[in-house]
């Protein structure tokens, strides 16, 4: 296309857009702006249209619905897109680095090692599952669970697998890691319940759990009766030693040393373990949320001290944040810049200890 024709097309598009701005409805104006520009905010109420109602009481459709989960660097476009001028009407997005290298500048690269890596991660296709700017779903997922998983995993075949009943479909990430895992099927290290229910014989990737299973198997082979093994598992549950209890149950299942008449007793112990595990998970979530809230307060206090010139006190707070496991990586990178600036200023003053 010649330069004159290209200018004509651009001029015509702009005129059409201006005419639309003057005469179209809000929805039509929004559609026109969204076609030509990225980052156009949604119309009032439109955020709800992105997540169709699945007819269930999904706990993830709660108070966070009217707001977006925002990607941390969104406030600084140049961090990902650079300062190069974007060509008008181009669908090609300027990035300072190709994917997934750009993502790994802030996010930790999944370590496959001798384990397994999720297909989209292995091929560097982060945006297959994640939105780069904002989303209605946690982790910036393009769709809520389990719909995001069903883009690739066939739902009919999943229903035939043990431990994959309809209720389980709402919580794929409770058992499976989204990026990588040392356990087969991307099982999380702590989700030994899935392994036990499915009677797996291969190592789980959790050395501590596998060692407990081996010990329990040795006891059974040495003549330990089923009632004794189940009683031992229940004692571990009462002592909150759930990994040991789950290991005994795994050893019992692997040994197949119980009859159909014994099955209800085995399932009863498994139910007791699952109830205790759920209690632990809920408490862990509460504890983590409380620690995150506490660290958020430390962050705000430290920033205020930094701005008011109380550099030593600010540095102590920032060091606490850097050693916390609930502070996001991107926030820690910003904190390191604060610390570096504080160190430089204190060194100039001769007060750095």
Image: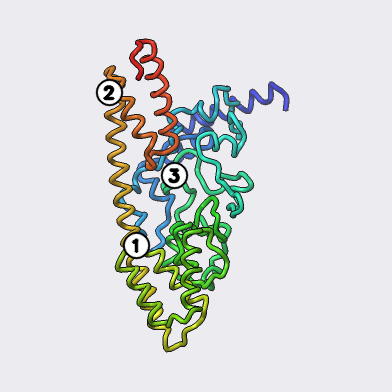
Location of residue 214 in the rendering, given as x and y in whole percent from the top left corner: 51, 68
Seen at 40% across and 42% down, the residue is: 69
Which element type, helix, strand or loop, lies under badge 3? strand
Q: Is residue 205 left or right of residue 45?
A: right
Local crowd size for mark 2, using a 10 Å CA cut-off: few (<14), some (14–19), many (≥20): some
Could you say which is closer to the camera, residue 17 or residue 349? 349
> Percent from the top left, x then y, of residue 162?
50, 72
User: Which of the marked residues, 2 or 3, is nearer the chain's N terminus?
Assistant: 3
- Residue identifier under label 3: 135
Residue closest to the far right? 2
Question: Quadrant of the rendered structure where residue 342 is?
Answer: top left
| Mark carried by residue 57 | 1
The tag earlier along the polypeptide, 3 or 1, is: 1
Look at the numbered discs 1 and 2 and tell me whether their residues touch, using CB distance below 8 Å: no
Residue at 59%, 52% in the rendered image: 117
Left or right for 268, reference 131? left
State the image coordinates of residue 264 (x, y, percent, origin top left): 39, 83
């Amino acid at each position: 296309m010649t330069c004159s024709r290209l200018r004509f097309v651009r001029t015509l598009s702009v005129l059409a857009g201006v005419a639309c701005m003057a005469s179209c409805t809000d929805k039509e104006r929004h559609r026109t702006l969204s076609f030509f520009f990225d980052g156009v905010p949604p119309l009032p109420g439109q955020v709800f249209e992105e997540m169709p109602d699945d007819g269930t009481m999904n706990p993830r459709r709660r108070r966070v619905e009217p707001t977006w989960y925002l990607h941390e660097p969104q406030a600084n476009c140049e961090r990902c897109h650079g300062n190069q001028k974007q060509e008008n009407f181009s669908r090609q997005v300027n990035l300072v680095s190709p994917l997934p290298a750009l993502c790994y500048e802030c996010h930790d690269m999944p370590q496959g090692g001798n384990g397994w890596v999720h297909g989209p991660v292995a091929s560097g296709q982060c945006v297959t599952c994640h939105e780069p700017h904002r989303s209605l779903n946690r982790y910036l997922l393009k769709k809520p669970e389990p719909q995001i998983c069903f883009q690739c995993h066939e739902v009919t075949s999943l229903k035939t697998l043990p431990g994959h009943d309809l209720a389980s479909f709402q919580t794929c990430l409770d058992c499976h890691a989204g990026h990588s895992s040392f356990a087969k099927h991307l099982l999380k290290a702590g989700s030994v319940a899935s392994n036990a229910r499915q009677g797996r014989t291969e190592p789980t990737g959790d050395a501590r759990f596998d060692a407990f299973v081996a010990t329990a198997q040795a006891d059974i082979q040495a003549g330990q009766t089923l009632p004794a093994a189940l009683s031992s598992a229940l004692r571990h549950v009462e002592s909150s030693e759930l990994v040991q209890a789950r290991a005994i149950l795994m050893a019992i299942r692997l040994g197949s040393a119980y009859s159909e008449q014994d099955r209800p007793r085995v399932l009863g112990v498994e139910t007791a373990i699952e109830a205790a595990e759920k209690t632990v998970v809920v408490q862990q979530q509460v504890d983590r949320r409380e620690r995150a809230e506490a660290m958020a307060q430390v962050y705000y206090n430290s920033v205020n001290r930094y701005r008011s010139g109380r550099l030593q006190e600010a540095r102590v707070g920032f060091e606490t944040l850097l050693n916390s496991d609930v502070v996001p990586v991107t926030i820690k990178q910003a904190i390191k810049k604060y610390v570096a600036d504080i160190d430089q200023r204190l060194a100039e003053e001769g007060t750095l200890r």
